[in-house]
Image (cartoon, helix red, strand yellow):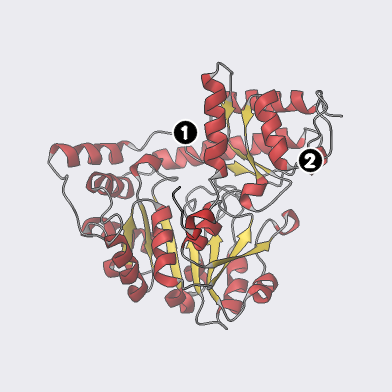
Amino acid sequence: MIKLSNRVQQVKTSATLAITAKAAELRAAGKNIISLSVGEPDFETPQAAREAGIEAITTGFTRYTAVPGIPELREAIAEKFHRDNDLDYAIEDILVSTGGKQCIFNLLLALMNNGDEAIIPAPYWVSYPDMVLLADGKPVIVDTTADADFKLTAAQLETAITPKTRLLFLNSPSNPTGMAYSHDDLAALGTVIRKHPNIIVATDDMYEKILFDGKKFATFAQVNPDLKAQTVTLSGVSKAYCMTGWRIGFCAGPRELIKAMSKIQGQSTSNPSSISQKAALGALLGPTDALEEMVRVYETRRTWLVNAINAIPGMHSIVPDGAFYVFPSVIGWLDKKTPDGTILNDDVAVCEWLLEEAGVALVPGTAFGSPGHVRFSYAVSQDTLEDAVNRIAKAAAQLQ
């Protein structure tokens, strides 16, 4: 029998992937399943990105590149940070990786020692705690509430910090809640971080372009420029440019730390795909019409979905600021019975029941550190959303 490492045995299987796999299994068995579980845009990769990728192939740009990314892409990323975020970085301060997730892995492996703590506000993206564990760190989960728009407060941060705190994760707009930190929110958190020069802030801005209601995006180092040397700003092309499969994420931060992260990457995956880097360059330099239209469509879907969810007895959602998720409470359904007598004792049971009964795949809030909730992804057509909500409402009407 193979003895697995303690490290891997601490890690949970991704709940999102598990639900997706179960939905695929039911679909293969002939059941009509609507999946609202995957956080993947339903729009096409922009034409400029596709053409740049094709050109890379046809011109033979298919060899190894520099580990941290091709210079022209890092220059475009530096320009993006300057234009969009008022942050000035040299290309030596920028790392391109195989997706945003690898940027985070590189950061954790370069920064964390055994027992170091990373503060993670909940609800959180499912992978943060497990990645911290893989880096031999300790996740410190701080619960937030819908009453506070699911955002970490300065008082909560101050209380959570210990002598072992090494990292703070911020994700705005958030997966799974869609809520975004305002300028004032980030300024308040900055007053706390300013007292702790050994803490690095990892700000995951993957959804920064998908923001609604005329809100202006702000990121931590932009609001707190004196803390730029304590901040790693993470982003990528996956969500805004509909390039999930191209696997390009990037980050910028203190040069010494970025250099260490590049060293980690050099001993794991080496450079990101040369073709994908050229496609990402095309996306960053290309027109933004498709992005702007996508955001308009998502905003319309968001508004419709929140209203529809809140019309179902036992479910309630606040209105997200951005991304393409809604994170309603299903506490009103807990301890109720389904027609076959099953008691819905938690959000996992709710999701299993909805998958079997209504043919709708959602992700339980427990996976995001917030039991009693479920996550909807509305990166599907309006017709699909309406079908899914009708099925859920019909199923909910049977609860006793």
Report crowding for label 1: few under 14, some 14 to 19, many 20 or more residues within 10 A (C-alpha). Answer: few
Q: Quadrant of residue 325?
A: top right
Q: Position of residue 127 (x, y in %)?
A: 52, 53
Front residue of this view, candidates 303 and 21: 21
Q: Earlier in the sequence, mark 2 or mark 1?
A: 1
- Numbered label tally: 2
Q: Judge whether residue 381 can be spotted in this image.
A: no
Which of the two residues, 67 or 251, is positioned nearer the viewer here? 67
Instruction: Check disc 1 and report its element: helix, strand or loop.
Output: loop
Report the residue marked by disc 2: 345
Which percent across, then down, holds residue 136? 49, 66
Residue pictured at 82% horizontal, 40% vertical: 332
Q: Most extreme residue toward the top, as rendered?
A: 30
Residue at left 47%, top 60%? 134
Q: Residue furthest right?
A: 400
> Is any atom of residue 224 visible in this view?
yes
Rendered position, 68 above or below 354: below
Q: Nearer the viewer, mark 2 or mark 1?
A: 2
In the rendered image, residue 35, in percent from the top left (x then y), is placed at 56, 30
User: In terms of image quadrants, where is residue 154?
Assistant: bottom right
From the image, tell me which residue sits under label 1.
42
Q: Is residue 252 above or below residue 324?
A: below
Q: Which secondary structure, mark 2?
A: loop
**What's the distance in space between the residues labelled 2 and 1, CA to CA?**
33 Å
Amino acid of disc 1: Asp
- Mark 2 is on which residue type? Asn
Residue furthest to the front in view is 1
**306 above or below 10?**
above
Q: Quadrant of the C terminus?
A: top right
